[in-house]
Amino acid sequence: MTPQWDPEKPIYLQLYQQVITRILDGNIKEGEALPSVRKVAAEYQLNPITISKAYQMLQDEQIVEKQRGKGLFVMPGAQDLMLDRERESFLSHQWPEILTQISRLKLSAEQLLSVNVNNQVEG
Amino acid sequence: MMSSLISISNLNKAYGSKKVLSGVNLSLNAGQIVGLVGPNGAGKTTCLQAILGLTDFDGDISVLGHHPRKDRVKMLNDVAYISDVAILPKWLKVSQALSYMQDIHPNFAIEKAQAFLAKTNIAANDKVKALSKGMVAQLHLALILAIDAKVLILDEPTLGLDILTRRQFYNHLLEDFYTEEKCIIVTTHQIEEIEHILTDVAFIQQGKIVLAQSTDDIKERFNLVAVSNEQVAQADELQPLFKNSMMGLTTMLFDNQDKETLQNLGKVTVPSLADVFVGIMNKETC
């Protein structure tokens, strides 16, 4: 299947993020191989350069490593590394924005928590 | 430095007094998948025919260092082509098509074609007349994949095929043919379907290349803005390429305008290649 890409962001970044999310969620495990560039290109109907760019970023950030002749593999410790990094990113970027919005809407802690509880009950 | 596999400069072509191509300049590099896109009659096929040495032309074309007319035989060792009117003889068996290619083409690797066909529903004993349209397209692809060409030229390769077969065609092209040393030129009317496959596009209109750029740069360069009625006059001053009013908002396409300026006019989005194509084509004709 071909994913629905957000036209506002470069696809290679979305692909990169997809790999990160799948490592975080445990869909791709440490030590596992990523599919080859041509496999992803064919499956997602993307030009291979887009995929190479995303894979290069993952390599540069030492999330995956190249094993000669065999392709790219998720590095040991990648999941913890990602977890630390995504937490840090959430706390420094998304969370302040959410806090601003919460105070703008004058929401109390009780109101926010009650939403959580309701969702859990429904879910 | 990327190596240029095809370079075209000042290509002109006329049929009698009718000019079909005027002043076409294009340079195609290894690794590129280039979409040659234009309305019917814009000169796409003529341009491809000139590259393939199938027609006379004025100007300079070099394909892998060869002149398409003078060194045609040498050039065709490394160039493959699927034409929208490609017709294999109906009485031909698949196995005969393969052995014929093996006899005439020095770079044809029959086992590659056989390996590819083994993944399809096409049998060696089938005659062309027994194959569906999609299977014929696959047979073509098997024949050209086995040539291991450096340059592949596809003229409406998926015309008349259903969506599954079109998807499968590009699937095989990307998985079994493409490498970074090769270059693919493709013409198609289904630009939405292959927009993410293309690394570059060239828009052609009335024999002229009106835009030739990487798809990444095009996404940077063009913007769509949804402008409210109050701001249309102000936005008009920035000379949109194209505008379309609908349900109280006017969507305008801008080329190379400052993003901040545009954001003050309305919601800015990135256009699809089809949006840019429609915008540019309509601009040139009004």
Image (cartoon, coloured by chain):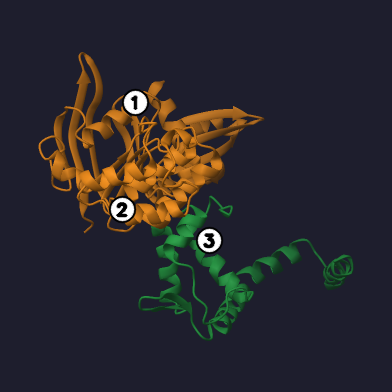
Instruction: Give the position of the N terminus of chain B as an image quadrant.
Output: bottom left
Say what amino acid the circle numbered 3 marks: Gln
Determine the CA span between mark 1 and mark 2: 37 Å
- Residue B229 in view here: yes
The answer to whether B203 appears left or right of B29 in the picture is right
Disc 2, SS = helix
Return the x and y of residue A62 as percentages of the image width and height: 44, 80
**Label 1 element class:** loop
Residue B237 visible in the current orientation: no
Work out which quarter of the rendered image holds the C terminus of chain B and state it.
top left
**Which residue is rendered at x = 58% and y = 38% of the image?**
B226
Q: Of circles 3 and 1, which is in front?
A: 1
Colour chosen for chain A: green
> How far is the residue under mark 3 from the one under mark 1?
35 Å
Q: Residue at x 72, y 63 (%)?
A: A101
Of residues A116 and B30, the one nearer the viewer is B30
Helix, strand or loop for disc 3: helix
Chain with orange colouring: B
Q: Which residue is mark 1?
A: B42
Q: Which residue is mark 3?
A: A14
Q: Which of the two discs, 1 and 2, sits closer to the camera?
A: 2
